[in-house]
Amino acid sequence: MELDHKAREAIEDIITRREGINSMQAQIKEDIKAVAEYLAIKPAQVGKIISLVERERAKGDAIEMERGIIEAAEVLTPMTQQAPEPEIV
C-alpha cells in the first residue's frame, strides 16, 4: 500500500493528537491524585465524585439514583454495631 502526501499528513496528525490526549490523561491522573491527597481520600473516590457530577450534568437524577442505591444497601446490610443493652443495676 502506498500512502500519498495527504494520507501521510492525516496519519501524522492522528498520531500527534493521540500523543496530546495521552499527555492530558496523564496530567488529569496527577490532578486527581493531588485533589485526593488534599482531601485525604483515595484517588478512586475523587474519580467517583467526578463521574457522578458528570452524569448529573449530562442527564440529571444521577445523584438521587445513587442515594437510592445507597439507602437500599444500608437496609440490606446487617448492623455491625448494635447499641449496648442498658445495664440493670
Image (cartoon, rainbow, N blue to C red):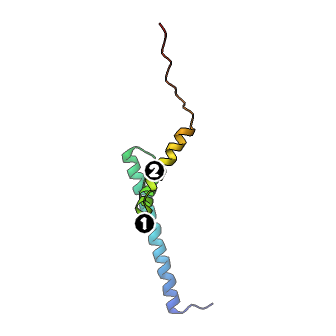
Work out how far the residue at label 1 is from the one at label 2, CA to CA, in angstroms: 17 Å
Is there a contact, CB below 8 Å, between mark 1 and mark 2? no
Sequence-earlier tag: 1 or 2: 1
Q: Give the image quarter of residue 29.
A: bottom left
Q: What secondary structure is found at the residue carrying circle 1? A: helix
Residue 35 position within the rendered picture, expressed as x and y whole percent measured from the top left: 38, 51
Residue 80 vertical placement versus 21 (above, below): above
**81 or 29: which is nearer to us?**
81
Instruction: Give the residue at mark 2.
Output: 43
Structural crowding at the residue carrying mark 1, measured as other residues with C-alpha within 10 Å and reported as few (<14), some (14–19) or many (≥20): few
The dot on residue 24 is 1
Query: What kind of residue is marked 2?
Result: Pro
The location of residue 85, given as percent across then percent down, is: 50, 18
Q: Residue at x 57, y 34 (%)?
A: 78
Q: Given the current orientation, which residue lies at the most extreme top position?
A: 89
Q: Amino acid at mark 1?
A: Met
